[in-house]
Image (tube, rainbow, N blue to C red):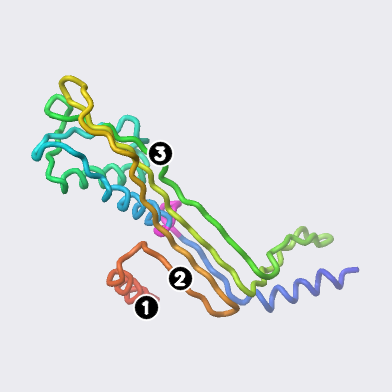
Amino acid sequence: MIRYPLLLLAIAVLLGGCTTLRETEPDQTARHQMLLSTAADEASQRISPNLPAGTSVFVNTDHFGSSDDYQSSYAIGAIRAAILKQGYNLAASADEADTIAEVSSGALSIDRRERLLGVPSASVPIPLAGPFKTPEISLWKSKERTGVAKFRLTFYDAETGALQDASDPVYGFSHFDRSSLLFFGSTDSNLMPPDVEERRESNAGTQD
């Protein structure tokens, strides 16, 4: 009766020759953070208020999210940068502003989808030894990660509260997709410009 678990163990040893160790600081990987920040960048680039040139704008983030989490902090910075690039000035407080920009976040997260053609990993009970997890055997595998950002901005007069400009929400997307066929893999991503990606790969090649 014990031959079957031992056979599975032998197969696992043969097929499990490649091991990946994951270390990251903080808890989120750099890729996770870049999926969110790249989507925030793309959404912010679509901000285009219809205000007089030189208007002093105070960005109200009370309804955006917690300033303690990095993704909200980065997104708010990207929104402020976009307003500056449009030719407006940022006010330090509402009392010093001509216009209040009320900003809120409808989405800032990551969607994940995985597809497999092969045999997925499974947990097999072994008498007197506890469960044993068999390795995954894939002929074709696809992992898709999509970052999604949705922001809404409403601009109103700082003194009267009258609406000055309100557009539809702005959206931004990022992606990191990896697929493999047997031992051959490919990656498609918009997280970094080509020249930055080349420097990253060059730097990774020099690490031990």
Q: Amino acid at mark 1?
A: Gly
Q: Position of residue 186 (x, y in %)?
A: 48, 74
Q: Amino acid at mark 2?
A: Thr
Range of residues picked out in magenta: 24-31
The residue lying furthest to the left in this view is 54
> For residue 106, which numbered disc appears in the image?
3
- Residue 44 is one of the magenta-drawn residues: no
Q: Earlier in the sequence, mark 1 or mark 3?
A: 3
> For residue 45, which numbered disc appears in the image?
none
Q: Which residue is mark 1?
A: 205
Q: Residues within 10 Å of mark 2 (few under 14, many from 20)?
A: few
Q: Residue at x 53, y 70 (%)?
A: 179
Q: Is residue 101 visible?
A: no
Residue 140 versus residue 200: which sits nearer the camera?
140
Q: Residue at x 70, y 68 (%)?
A: 119
Q: Earlier in the sequence, mark 3 or mark 2?
A: 3
Question: How many marks are shown on the rendered structure?
Answer: 3
Q: Position of residue 74 (x, y in %)?
A: 30, 46
Q: Which residue is mark 2?
A: 187
